[in-house]
Image: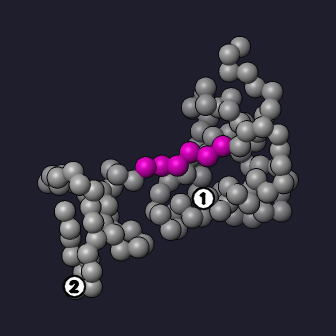
Amino acid sequence: MKFAAGHGVGEASVPEQPLVASDVLKRTTDNTLVRVSDIRPIGIGTGGGDAPGLNAVLRAVVKSAILKHESKVIGIPDGFDSLLWPEKARELTLKDVSGILPRDGTILGTTNRGNPFQ
């Protein structure tokens, strides 16, 4: 289904499922309309040993997801171990990644000793 993107400037597509009265549409930064329910959060974690640049990657993912794609980012702390304890996960915001480039390691923490089978 197509919707006018405003004043005849172009068209924005909405996912192919039929719209219902309760659907909430949102215009993204690239001028497309999407259902709010179709916007999925991104989960990000760091596993293995510490490595330089992990904070830079986390910062880039969070900034791009929020500013460009208007999506949420869920930080998964302490490597793969936290996949077993989802209550440890938290939403990462722009404030969380502000000023982390010069910091060592990763703001999420990591491990290379976890064994989910024990």
Of circles 2 and 1, the one toward us is 2
Q: Is residue 15 magenta?
A: no
Give the residue pinned by disc 2.
Answer: 8
Residue 87, how many percent across, how many down?
57, 32
Image height of 113 relative to 98, above or below: above
| Residue at 32%, 61% in the rendered image | 34
Q: Dot 2 surroundings within 10 Å: few (below 14), some, or many (20 or more)?
A: few
Residue 4, how many percent across, how many down?
21, 76
Helix, strand or loop at mark 2: loop
Quadrant assignment, res 60: bottom right
| Residue at 21%, 70% in the rendered image | 3
Helix, strand or loop at mark 1: helix
Image height of 33 relative to 5, above or below: above
Q: Which mark is residue 45?
A: none
Give the residue pinned by disc 1.
Answer: 62
Image height of 110 relative to 41, above or below: above
Q: Quadrant of the C terminus?
A: top right
Q: Is residue 43 magenta?
A: yes
| Residue type at the position of mark 2 | Gly
- Magenta part of the chain: 40-45
Q: Do we see residue 25 in this rendering?
A: no
Question: Is residue 77 rendered to the left or right of residue 9?
Answer: right
Quadrant assignment, res 49: top right
Q: Do we see residue 106 in this rendering?
A: yes
